[in-house]
Amino acid sequence: MGALSDRLAELAHRQHGRVSREQLLVAGIDRNRITRWIADGRLRRVHHGVYAVGHRAPSMLGDYMAAVLASGRDAVLSHLPVAYMMRTIATASPPPPEVTIPDSKSRSRPGITIHRSQLHSLDVAVLNGIPITILPRVLLDLAPRLTSDELGRACHEAWVRHRTRPRHIEACIARNPHKPGAAKLRRALGSDITLSMLEDGFLELLSAYGLSRPRTNIDYRGDKVDCHWPELGLTIELLSYRYHASRRAFELDVARRRRSNHYAFTYGDVFERAPQTAAEVGELIGGARRRSASG
């Protein structure tokens, strides 16, 4: 009895407190014992053939694990739940489970959205012990349901948080050439978006003072940059003071960077010192234009 309970506990520990009937049988726990454990509350049914072990505490990861277990072999978590787990798309609460399976004959499960598709082995990974589709495949799957701006922001977050480069996404598209949304995703990779009030304010400042607008949040020499003028070879970053001891310390740090030709501006530069900032940016643009003309 103790050994069987230990096996159950070990299995549940690896899977966020969720186990399948098939796994219990493979672990040597027979049908009669499973029935008794259901009766005494040690196992609680969450899907057909899938159980929560021992408690009723809500668990996002447990719910996602249970959905994968309930959907059969080779099932993986996909679409919006993976984007939510990887913090590339924000929603008010964890999205309902979505699972991709290869078997077109598999039955639907209440509370689980089932997608049927043959997944390439390179498009599958494991996150927090849960089989998932990788982030480029998630972006490709979600492309048809997101707006262009939403997709552009998701691509940006994938880059910043997980170093998902355009080449990774292009490789995924090449493995899945007939997926709807591929063209839309390619456009999003090169789209100009703004991601903060600071970026919006900086662009408004440029317009107000008649300065040329840059491209924003694009790939430049293998990195994401906030503002870039391709024709001038000029890049400007817009920085917050989140990681400094005080706003004053941050402002001084950015001023030091600019003296070293690392062009960066802050909230204070944009919203509190607009005339001085416009003059400084104008000088940077003018200098870059002169260098470009002489080169």
Image: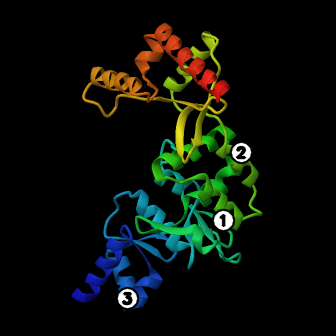
281 lies above or below 262? above
Q: Nearer the viewer, mark 3 or mark 2?
A: 2
Residue 249: x %, y % from top left: 27, 24
Residue drawn at (59%, 24%), measured in percent from left and top? 288
Camera-side residue of 21 and 295: 295
Looking at the image, do the residues carrying marks 3 and 2 touch, with CB atoms under 8 Å apart?
no
Task: Please name whichever residue, 195 or 15, is drawn nearer the observer in this view of the structure.
Answer: 195
Give the distance between the C-alpha atoms of the residues marked 2 and 1, in whole angstroms.
25 Å
Secondary element type, mark 3: loop
Q: Separation of disc 3 and disc 1 at Cα?
A: 29 Å
Residue at the image point whose x is 73% and y is 54% from the top: 182
Query: As drawn, which residue projects farthest toward the left?
Result: 2
Residue 41 visible in rendering: no
Label 3 or label 2, whichever comes before in sequence order: 3
Residue 116 position within the rendered picture, expressed as x and y whole percent measured from the top left? 68, 69
Which x, y percent locates residue 285? 58, 20
* N-terminal-most mark, 2 or 1: 1
The quarter holding residue 216 reads: top right
What residue sits right under mark 1 in the picture? 115
Q: Is residue 120 left or right of residue 159?
A: right
**Callout 1: helix, strand or loop?**
strand
| Residue labelled with disc 2 | 187
The disc placed on residue 27 is 3
The amino acid sitting under disc 3 is Ala
